[in-house]
Amino acid sequence: SAVISQKPSRDICQRGTSLTIQCQVDSQVTMMFWYRQQPGQSLTLIATANQGSEATYESGFVIDKFPISRPNLTFSTLTVSNMSPEDSSIYLCSVDKGNTDTQYFGPGTRLTVL
Amino acid sequence: GQQLNQSPQSMFIQEGEDVSMNCTSSSIFNTWLWYKQDPGEGPVLLIALYKAGELTSNGRLTAQFGITRKDSFLNISASIPSDVGIYFCAGGIQGAQKLVFGQGTRLTINP
């Protein structure tokens, strides 16, 4: 498995502002992912964070709204830009250590936008 | 795109009962995973399945990778209060290195 931490664990933000969420892993991993989980819903993949190249975004998610950084093999950030109340969700990062489609998740960041 | 149909959506059982939930799809998956999510936490991996027909146990949990690669089930035997939570299945898309998640099964246990 992997030990994954996220910061912040929760935040309450004002409409129109941006929040950057950090994800730190205890070992080097090739694949890191960012998910959104809206209240009472399942997990939806936002993007795959690739080290040394631009993130790969899923349909319905764009870089301008959710810019991602992946400066090294143990760290990634997701920014939620120009927030609106509809962005209130849990944001989760995950890693696939062995490229086996087996993902381990961080504890999540609970975001509330007023 | 690929979709997973997870059922039931919710279950209300008595402590000590056995539980069964499943996921089906019209698409073939390379991997089947089962996660449990407690309130305020991230999903925790329970069981990972990598081969069609594979049957794997983890304590009181048993899961199987369907022979057609389009379905999987999770059984929990002799449920206890700490089994309460939301269970998600996830399928690994061959060649894509990403997962598709089911809608979740919310398990409630009456003591």
Image (cartoon, rainbow, N blue to C red):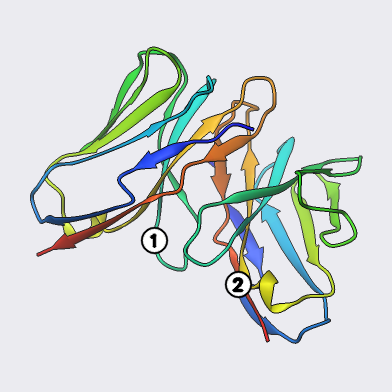
Seen at 8% across and 50% down, the residue is B16
The residue drawn where x is 62% and y is 60% is: A5
Identified by mark 2, the residue type is Ser
User: Dot 1 surroundings within 10 Å: few (below 14), some, or many (20 or more)?
Assistant: some
Q: Nearer the viewer, residue B51 or B100?
A: B100
Q: Is residue B17 above or below residue A22?
A: above
Q: Quadrant of the N terminus of chain B?
A: top right
Circle 2 SS class: loop
Residue identified by numbered label 2: A9
Task: Tell whether A96 sits left or right of B107.
Answer: right
Q: Quadrant of the C terminus of chain B?
A: bottom left
Task: Give the label on residue B106, or none.
Answer: none
Taking the spot 52% from the left edge, 67% from the top edge, the residue there is A39
Work out whether residue B98 can be spotted: yes
Disc 2 residue crowd, few under 14, some 14–19, many 20+, Cα 10 Å: some
Is residue A64 placed above or below A102 in the rendered structure? below
- Please state the horizontal and vertical placement of residue A108, each as a whole percent of the image: 58, 62
Q: Position of residue B40 (x, y in %)?
A: 46, 68
Q: Is residue B109 above or below residue A13?
A: above
| CB-based contact (under 8 Å), mark 2 and mark 1 | no
Return the chain for callout 2.
Answer: A
What is the C-alpha distance between the residues marked 2 and 1? 15 Å
Which-is-in-front pick, marks 2 and 1?
1
Please indicate, yes or no, whether residue A2 appears anywhere in the rendered image: no
Residue A95 location, quadrant? top right
Task: From the viewer's perspective, tell me whether residue A72 is left or right of residue B99.
Answer: right
State the mark number for residue B38. 1
Q: Amino acid at mark 1?
A: Asp
Q: Nearer the viewer, residue B83 or B106?
A: B106
Q: Horizontal and vertical percent for residue A22?
A: 73, 63
